[in-house]
């Protein structure tokens, strides 16, 4: 009896370790494939505009890469509504390889803000061949105004604001021409899908830049830099930076979707609430 007990104990220990390793692997896969890609966070930024009036709440949504309008995107729409935005801005990459424009429009119709919804397009719209005036017509039917190197003015809670939509890939000549439209008496909010562009051409008329594109790196190992960032990301990953000779605030949103692989690690999706104070 005693001679046979040893192997049995070793087998049990080995099985325990194997089951533990398998459990950890399963938990890790569940985290990167489901929990983190769907664990959206609300990030917040407050900025003074120098304008009179009451605060203005802007919600930024970016990088949907929408394949289907399942429960996750319904949750996003509810989460945006819960922030009670005055204005919603969208910073590109709505489509994925399936070119599911109907799903995108269904999601956009669920968004509501008293001052409307303004958008710019990203690289995936160009790759999908649904860019420009074609996309503008689709968005108009969903209640969204697509800005293609143009300015849109608003008066919100006593503040005079302008939203400048810089088109992908945010070339320097586009930036210079768009800045010429900016009124220094207003607070000018610049939307650009990509964060890396000709910041040296920014002047004092631009008060804030909102971008997406990077997905925050999507997979972030501790201490190490992102494993991959798409072209036109530059040094920008996520969060708040200051760029150009006037140290213009630039915020990079991690997006709500995933690209290439449907995974996230140490990099939750986000919507951003920007409060513009007087």
Image: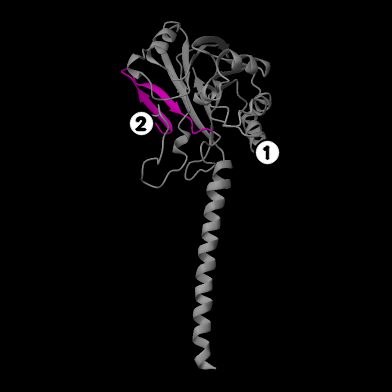
Classify residue 196 as left or right of residue 61. left
- Badge 2 or badge 1: first in the primary sequence: 1
Q: Residue at x 66, y 32 (%)?
A: 78
Question: Residue tagged by mark 2?
Answer: 235
Disc marking residue 30: none
Q: Are marks 2 and 1 in contact (CB under 8 Å)?
A: no
Classify residue 200 as left or right of residue 230. left
Where residue 71 sits in the image (x, y, percent)?
A: 68, 38
Helix, strand, or loop for circle 2? loop
Q: Residue at x 67, y 37 (%)?
A: 70
Above or below, 45 against 225 in this view is above
Helix, strand, or loop for circle 1? helix
Classify residue 155 as left or right of residue 240. right
Where residue 129 sits in the image (x, y, percent)?
A: 56, 21
Give the number of marks.
Answer: 2
| Residue 233 part of the magenta-drawn span | no
134 and 121: which one is in front?
134
Where residue 134 sits in the image (x, y, percent)?
A: 60, 15
Magenta part of the protein: which range?
235-255
135 and 82: which one is in front?
135
42 and 232: which one is in front?
232
Q: How is the image coloured?
A: one colour
64 and 205: which one is in front?
64
Q: Residue at x 51, y 43 (%)?
A: 264
Query: Split into 4 quadrants, where in the image is the N terminus?
Result: bottom right
Where residue 230 sits in the image (x, y, percent)?
A: 43, 32
Question: Residue tagged by mark 1?
Answer: 71
């Amino acid at each position: 009896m005693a001679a046979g007990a040893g192997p049995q104990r070793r087998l049990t220990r080995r099985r325990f370790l194997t089951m533990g390793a398998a459990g950890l692997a399963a938990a890790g896969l569940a985290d990167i494939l489901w929990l983190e890609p769907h664990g959206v966070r609300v990030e917040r930024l407050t900025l003074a505009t120098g304008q009179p009036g009451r605060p203005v709440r802007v919600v930024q949504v970016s990088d949907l890469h929408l394949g289907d309008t399942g429960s996750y995107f319904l949750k996003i729409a509810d989460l945006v509504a819960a922030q009670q935005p005055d204005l919603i801005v969208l910073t590109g990459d709505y489509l994925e390889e399936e070119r599911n424009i109907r799903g995108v429009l269904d999601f956009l119709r669920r968004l509501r803000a008293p001052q409307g919804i303004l958008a710019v397009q990203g690289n995936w719209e160009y790759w999908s061949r649904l860019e420009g005036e074609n996309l503008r017509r689709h968005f108009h039917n969903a209640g969204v105004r697509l800005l293609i190197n143009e300015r849109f003015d608003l008066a919100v809670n006593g503040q005079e604001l302008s939203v400048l939509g810089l088109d992908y890939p945010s070339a320097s000549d586009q930036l210079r021409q768009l800045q010429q439209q900016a009124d220094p008496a207003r607070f000018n909010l610049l939307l650009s899908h990509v964060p890396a562009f000709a910041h040296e051409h920014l002047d004092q008329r631009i008060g804030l830049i909102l971008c997406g594109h990077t997905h925050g790196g999507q997979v972030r190992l501790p201490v190490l830099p992102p494993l991959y960032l798409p072209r036109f990301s530059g040094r920008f990953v996520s969060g708040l930076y200051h760029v150009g000779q006037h140290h213009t605030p630039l915020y990079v949103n991690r997006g709500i979707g995933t690209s290439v692989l449907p995974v996230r690690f140490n990099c939750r999706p986000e919507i951003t609430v920007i409060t513009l104070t007087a």
